[in-house]
Amino acid sequence: MQSFTFHPGPRLISGAGEAVPLAGKLPAGPCLFVTDQQVVRLGLTDDCRGALEASGRPVVLFDSVEADPSRATLMAAVAAGEAAAVRSVIGFGGGSPMDVAKLAAYLLGSGDELDEIWGVDVAQGARLPLALAGTGSEASPISVITCEGGVKLAVNARPLTADWAVLDATLTLGLPPHVTAATGIDAIVHAVEAFTSARLKNPLSDALAREALRLLSANLLTACNQPDNFEARSAMLLGAHLAGLAFANAPVAGVHALAYPLGGIHHLPHGVSNALMLRHVLAHNSEAARDHYAELAEIIAPECVGQGSQARAALLIERLDLLVTESGIAPRLRDHGIQEQHIPLLASEAMKQGRLLVNNPCPIAEADARRLYEAAW
């Protein structure tokens, strides 16, 4: 067997209403509660915040997190935590609140300067106790922040792994189909890219990625079309978590690298950005990753068992692209207001994502990126 290292994620609690008991798992004292205004407006945080208050843990609510959170937003959350001398942090909602919560907990606990910890395994200090309730990002030790000029920078370090994570499907019931589609495709990309990562791919991440893809591909359209289907929502939530554990160990690659400029410059939701580039990057990788793609194809299209590896790899790309369109995501860059003359800038910005490009099974140079954006346009 190959030599490998696998880092488990946070302690996991799964079930309806399980976000409420988080209160008793955190230390006494004020808690920085990081979320966004839509989640608060929907009332999804009410029970958890009420339990914190009732347990004598005053809530410092920070609900100003936007999609693709900015450096200014992160530092505002840190300032709010410092002013209240918080003893713990909860991130509640989608990936953006969790990104802010993870990094705020670290900065508040360690006292490190943000500009000194960008990158992989640079941050080595101690963070405040951290709990996350969300849709996949709770599994990973990664926080992505949009900085000056729309450039996305990341801290990827084990101290950002939460102490506790909650999977509570009741918190996702009724979410709009376009949100479900974007987060679901994002999680599918996590699974596929982890399984084909050129670095750190290992048997445990592979097993998690395969099961994640099975759960996600089988339930995405049901969750989109039946927003109150609890079983489909539960399967999606577990699939997203497993995919998060997979890519926390076998990092994502080219799809994410080319998606980031779409979010940083044009402010597209992260899952939509991934969906727009998925087919084209997978086609670029199709020969280098043919055997891996062929194996994944059997999960979402069991009827292809016995076909040649090239046919199965092509079928995987076709079926994933079909999931994108059937989930309601418009598949072309032009559908989202991106003009063809933006492509050279997108390509040059994608080259700044070296930490991701190094994981791609096939090299992506700037000329390749330009060609892939052109194909997506």
Image (cartoon, grey):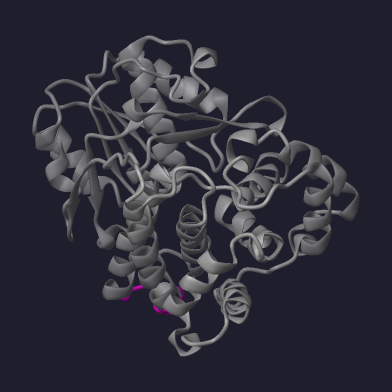
Percent across and percent down for residue 72 are 56, 23
Residue 283 visible to the viewer: yes
At 39% from the left edge and 78% from the top edge, which residue is drawn? 226
Percent across and percent down for residue 312 are 56, 79
- Count the marks: 0
Q: Nearer the viewer, residue 199 or 177?
A: 199
Q: Nearer the viewer, residue 55 or 368?
A: 368
Q: Quadrant of residue 320?
A: bottom right
Q: Relative to residue 18, is residue 330 depicted above or below? A: below
Task: Indicate the quadrant containing the C terminus: top left, top right, bottom left or bottom right.
Answer: bottom right
Magenta-colored span = 221-229
Percent across and percent down for residue 60 are 30, 26
At 58% from the left edge and 35% from the top edge, which residue is drawn? 355
Q: Is residue 234 left or right of residue 361?
A: left
Percent across and percent down for residue 196 are 52, 56
Outermost residue to the bottom: 303
At 77% from the left edge and 44% from the top edge, which residue is drawn? 365
Q: Is residue 123 left or right of residue 7?
A: right
Residue 223 visible to the viewer: no
At 75% from the left edge and 37% from the top edge, which residue is drawn? 349
Outermost residue to the right: 341
Q: Nearer the viewer, residue 131 or 158?
A: 158
Instruction: Look at the image and say whether residue 228 sits in the magenta stretch.
Output: yes
Q: Is residue 155 left or right of residue 89?
A: right
Instruction: Look at the image and say whether residue 39 sits in the magenta stretch.
Output: no
